[in-house]
Amino acid sequence: MSCSVNELISGDPEVVVEGRGLGRTWRLILSYLKLPRNQWEALIDNYSMTLSKGGGSGEKEAPNIKGNLVQALCEEEITWATFIKGLLSLNREEVSITFIMYRKCGESEEVYEVPPQYLTTLKELKRKNIAVNSSALAMSTSTLSRAWKDIASGMTATSKKDEPLGKSTFSQYLTEYVQLELDELKSRGLLENQTKSSVRARIQKRLSREELSWKAFINGLRILKVNYFKMTIGLKTTKGDAVNVTMKMNL
């Protein structure tokens, strides 16, 4: 369920909990920032004008970019690309994203922290005199792909010495997951033309994309049997003021 802009920036807890996944995270961030309506409008205007001046594909989006972005940001569930655009529109000096994974290993719990991923902000692009267009924005949306590669490498076995730690290779995790998906498709009567190899290839293709989708990222974590994770968004201003917002997501 979408909400109005006034509801979105109000910080109302009921509006926050109505969001799902990244949509809830975005609403939680805004509840921390408590932006007045005029400041929100100024930030969105700055973002849309900056992108429109960037040329390339951004120029084609210019006439409708503000309306499209605001509409997307008001949805209860948003994509990774929209989430990144929202973070960039806040026009902070530094924006970081940190993931911490939690997975049960017998009686213990494995914790794996991904090094902070930093977005290429509008301020940074301007300092480097780089045109702010869709190609430039891709440098920030690809942070999810980089985080996934780190997680997949760090939470899987790379040699036999890892096996006593309870880790499997990614291939082993994927084989188990593919079978579960096939069993689910069969129970729903949707197994026709679906094979282990076709399902496996489809999953691998989605996980290998440079601009990884949030849905594919979540599926990847499920493949690795992650039980839940925490995502922290760090926002720093030119003056050094910082806001850190953490969201826990169960899988």
Image (cartoon, rainbow, N blue to C red):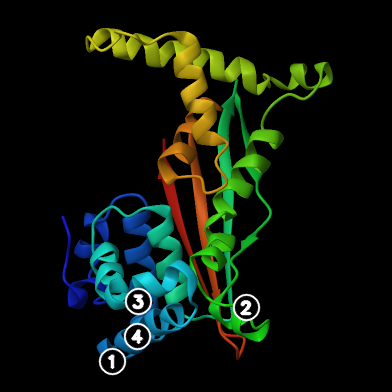
Q: CA gap, disc 2 to disc 3?
A: 18 Å
SS at badge 4: helix
Which mark sits nearer the N-terminus, 3 or 4?
4
Which mark sits nearer the N-terminus, 1 or 4?
1
Q: CA gap, disc 3 to disc 1?
A: 21 Å
Q: Amino acid at mark 1?
A: Asn
SS at badge 3: helix
| Residue 225 in view, yes or no | no
SS at badge 2: loop
Q: Amino acid at mark 2?
A: Ile
Could you tell me which residue is drawn at 49 percent across and 34 percent down? 206
Could you tell me which residue is drawn at 30 percent across and 76 percent down? 66
Q: Which residue is mark 4?
A: 45
Q: CA gap, disc 2 to disc 4?
A: 19 Å
Q: Which residue is mark 2?
A: 130
Q: Which residue is mark 3?
A: 62
Camera-near label (3 vs 1) is: 3
- Binning the other alpha carbons within 10 Å of mark 1 as few (below 14), some (14 to 19) or many (20 upward) gives few
Looking at the image, which is closer to me, 82 or 29? 82
